[in-house]
Image (cartoon, rainbow, N blue to C red):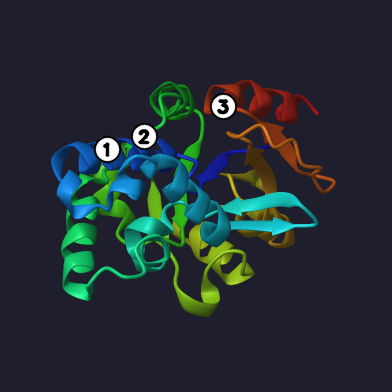
Amino acid sequence: MIDTVLFDLDGTLRDWQSAITRALADLRDEAPEALPAELRDDLDARVWRAIDEQLVVRREGRVMERRHYWINIDPVPVWRTLLPDLHQRSLDELLARFRELLDAAPYADVYPALEQLREGYALGVLTNGPRPESVLRRMGFAHYFDAIVTVFGGTKKPAGAAFEQALEALGAEPARTVHVGDSLIADVQGALSAGLTPIWIDRFDDRNPLPEGAHRIEALTELPPLLVSLAEG
């Protein structure tokens, strides 16, 4: 029986794709003079191409992980690729404004899913990202979670120690816990190795093959009925 649900944060609850698209539009409208004309006219396509090259992990041609959130933590590599000749001070000013504009909101399916799950399950968040409590409070969802755990360095997902830390914080057992995440490496492989049941949220319709014991959903609203079916065996 499943009694605990653990969630990844970025790419699972938090929508970075839409946030980046909005920030680029605002940046182009607000400070067009900061961008070369050829970049200004094709900003979205070129930024997403750079993100795809630098922040998307592939194996044998399949997407395993989209690290879109990293453009907020360290945007320099992506933007330096696009603006190799821009003076460092000008680049710093541009990136500072980009990050101010970059506000990742929750996916639309987060609230209804958490509302359904809150009565029947212990809920937690396990992320490799910084300051998850602040992020969840700002999004209005912190009160849904019984534990919010962030991990760094050698203990970050997919390391088993990351999942052990989250289970301890929740007082949960791995065999009674599912972990929901968008990364086939950090979330699916990590959870499976730690003895949890992985649920891959495939928001980009990649439809990659999954290891035995893992499950796939396209939206968080599919999670409550999946948990019911898992309980029924």
Report whether residue 10 is seen: no
Q: Earlier in the sequence, mark 3 or mark 1?
A: 1
Task: Say which residue appears at 63% left-offset and 68% top-offset.
Answer: 160
Instruction: Give SS at disc 3.
Output: loop
To which quarter of the image does residue 174 belong? bottom right
Label 2 to label 3: alpha-carbon separation: 12 Å
Give coordinates of residue 190: x percent, y percent: 66, 60
Q: Element under label 2? A: strand
Q: Distance between the residues labelled 2 and 1?
A: 7 Å
Residue 168 visible in the shown view: yes
* Residue corresponding to mark 1: 139
- Amino acid, disc 1: Met
Q: Where is residue 2 drawn, in percent x and y?
A: 64, 38
Per the model, the C-alpha gap separating discs 3 and 1 is: 18 Å
Report which residue position mark 3 lands on: 219
Instruction: Using residue 12 as the reference point, say whether residue 98 is left or right of it.
Output: left
Q: Residue at x 81, y 42 (%)?
A: 209
Q: Which quadrant is home to the C terminus?
A: top right
Instruction: Relative to 176, say whether 118 is above or below.
Output: above
Instruction: Name the residue located 30 percent from the left edge and 42 percent from the top edge.
Output: 24
**Earlier-in-chain disc, 2 versus 1:** 2
Mark 1 packing: few (<14 Cα in 10 Å), some, or many (20+)?
some
Q: Mark 2 points at which residue?
A: 106
